[in-house]
Amino acid sequence: MKSLIVIAVCVGAFIAAPLFIVVPMSFSNAPSFQFPPPGYWLGYYEQYFTDYHWTIPTANSFIIATATMLLTMALVVPAAFGLARNRFFGRSLVNYLIMAPLMVPHIVVALAYYLFFGPLHLTGTHLGVILAHTCLSVPVAFLIVTATLKGFDRNLERAAMSLGAGPMATFFYVTLPVLRPGFLVGALFAFLHSFDETTVAIFIAGGTAATLPRKMFEAIRLESDPVIAVVSTLLLGLVLAGTVISVFVRQRNEKKATMYAD
Amino acid sequence: MRRPLVRAWMLVAPVMVFLAVTFLFPLLEIFVLSVSGTNHWADAYVEFFTTDFYNIILLRTFGIAFFVTVFCLLLAYPLAYVIVRVGGGLGFGLLLIVAMSFWTSFLVRIFAWLVILGNRGPVVGVLEWFAPGDAPEVLFTRFSVVIGLVHGMIPFMVMAIYASMRKIDPNNLRAAASLGATPLQGFRHVFLPLSLPGVVNGCTLVFIICAGFYVTPVLLGGAQDQMIAGLIGQQIEELLEWEAASAMAMVLLFAILVLYALYNRFVGLDKLWG
Amino acid sequence: MAKITNSSSITPIRRRTFIKSTAAVAGLIAAPNIIRPAWAKGETLYINTWGGVWTKSATEAFIAPFSKETGIEVKTLSPVSFAKLKAQVRTGKYEWDATTQGIPDCARALRENLLEPVGKVVDPAKLSPGAINYNGIKSHALGTALTYRKDKFPNGGPQSWADFWDVEKFPGNRSMYNNASRVLPAALQADGVPRDKLYPLDLDRAFRKLDEIKPHIKVWWKQGSQSEQLLRDGEVDMIQMWNGRAANVQSQGVDAEIVWNGAEILMVNWIVVRGTPRADLAWRYIQSAHQAERQATFASLMKYGPANPKAFEYIDEKLAKTLPTYPDNAKVAYTPDPDWTGANMGEMVKRFNRWLAS
């Protein structure tokens, strides 16, 4: 068992250690990727926050991910209710279609949108990227929302109805509050799925609709632009913060649960 | 009986229409494009399957995906095992590391490897120290592609295996031990078989994602390490041979759908995403 | 009379301030406005640039003075890509309006009907004679030359493409430009074809020669900044690269030598993508970029030879010697045949890509 633990820790180090190399790199003053850095400064941070080649894609990514999240949830929530609470002919077919975008390689999707959006003048537009990202986010959000719905005890609704609540009141005062955390997680996943999406964005999010991952891809491939280290550090910081917060939230919830249990 | 049916369809209709228009139709379009050769409908496919160059790329793609899957499995299994069986602070910490890597953009991870494996990075620095002037190339080789992909895919593998290991009741192992099984026998005959569904899930996911992956080989590989996704990208961006690109995309898609079908036949597709 | 003039001149100013402050407030409130203040007004020109030091130099020499003089906002977008030019014409969706391409690519683009004819806003009298060709206006001459790290070759480095191919005499890591029209002539010269007999290129012979060097090429670079990084970081000891990028690496303190022998000297045009709604704006910009002083500034920053001969009035001998157009440099170099290359580019690129990836 000891040797297994050693192996596991080594694998953990292999997973984690490379990530953190981006932090010292972001303060490097070298014009190219050199480690350890020859000297330190904040110049590339300044460039990231002031150069429009970086600020526009950053803003675009937030806007596109937010819109994708809203559109995805608007499509997924009704569909999840429809599928979870009814048995009907063609139900599994609907299920397959909703999951299909998860099964097709992104490069194939990218090619399809590249050709489809061209004549519609949607390449290089925010709308085009939002539509594409929504397609890819639908299955992810759907899985989470469906799982939430499956765990929902419908007796709560029946109880509310029997106490005289109408269907609308039941939905807004009983169903939604119980399901809200699951929906929020689904929405978060849709947001992150869009925010992280790279391959499709590379091919259709050109010009003024460029997203951050696309810009990062180009910064690596075309320019060897050291600003990429700054972006990487900031993104890593966000992930770290998210992980810490989720751990705290979980612990708090567990505490609450044990309190109620007592 | 009719009313709920209508209501269900109304709830489902928006997403169906949306996906039909913005997903199925574009895919259908590239399928049509792939079978609209000027001389014969299958021109693009005939060229694809009769040109050595394309066959090499196809074999290379599946070869790399296979090796990446195997390496991922070898690294992920012990890690998931320790997370589940040892648990505690160590297990939780390792699980957090995996989750963090999972949520970190592929591009950040690729950039990290570019620095680590680059000519002025730590790996070459150490190699130079041992063999001055004779250090082997590491970046822009098959090696850097595989290591970048393994690092990128390993969270998927760990998560899949972890999910199935967590369901294993420790009492099974205790029962085996009380019946006189050594820990190794208990692992071989009880734990391992029960964890296999996770292994199958992880391998299927990793292989499929790898086979169609674009970013890593393009950024970490040399000209001779390109996989089929990179080739499709080149057809779109540089050569504008959209017919050939469509045919390749269809070949890739078909290969992947076959894998999904096999998985569905033996395991059931609904288990893949848990 | 005076009163009237007075009042009428005040109102617009007041109105403008009002509009401005309203716009500022609206900008703060409406987040999406952060990303689209510019093209909402319609007076933004998008220029496609080659990235890195090129973008910086072109911004300083051409773009900033043009913006200052006309008040038109100009944004730069990288990278340059022939495919993008084609895709924009095909789809009618324009990410950028003007770009620069070597004359052979302009010839190819013209054959494929991708270029806007030189606009009526351009006054030929303000250009140097012969500046207009292939639907473009000449900008500068670019050298693509063998460059090596002098510190890696203390006893003398490679002096020709034949030396570049000689891996016994000149061991070391090599890199070439991932570009068929640059690599094939180099291979033919290495195989003994004289500079003036290169065209039409003997492709079979060139690829046979390329087979010899392929295992020794560590990286086939695609973008200028990448070639700089390879040379600067010592990832390669010799490389085929643009002289302006090599000069930039030299200026960063790297001991590199440009070998003009066998180099390609290529005239580069400013061109406008066909059908763009901002074509007139683009041509105004291009005309301004042909001014002698701006051309001289670009030459001093980028070390490319100005297409406007008058620019040399602003260029001293020391700078002139580093330019591809300097007689000592030009006489040992070759210029590509634009029409042959333009006509055969598609086939060359296809064959080259396959050769490269297998």
Image (cartoon, coloured by chain):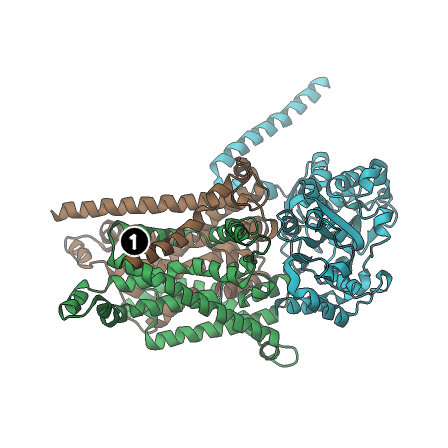
Q: Amino acid at mark 1?
A: Gly
Q: Residues within 10 Å of mark 1 (few under 14, many from 20)?
A: some
Specify the quadrant of the image occupied by residue A186. Answer: bottom left
Chain coloured cyan in this rendering: C
- In the figure, B89 relative to C214: above or below? above
Apparent side of residue B162 relative to residue B182 in the rendered image (left or right): right
The residue lying toward the viewer, choosing from A142 and C159, is C159
**Horizontal placement of B128 versus C306: left or right?**
left
Chain B palette colour: green
- The quarter of the picture where the N terminus of chain C appears is top right
Q: Position of residue C30 (x, y in %)?
A: 48, 39
For residue C166, say whether it is visible.
Answer: yes
Q: Where residue C20 appears, x then y in whole percent? A: 57, 31
Chain A colour as displayed: brown
Which chain is indicated by disc 1? A
Q: Can you see residue C266?
A: no
Q: Which residue is mark 1?
A: A182
Q: Position of residue C325 (x, y in %)?
A: 83, 47
Identify the element where label 1 is drawn.
helix
Residue drawn at x 44%, y 49% as measured from the top left: A19
Q: Nearer the viewer, residue A224 or B205?
A: A224
* Residue drawn at 40 percent across, 51 percent down: A16
Residue closer to the observer: B245 or B132: B132
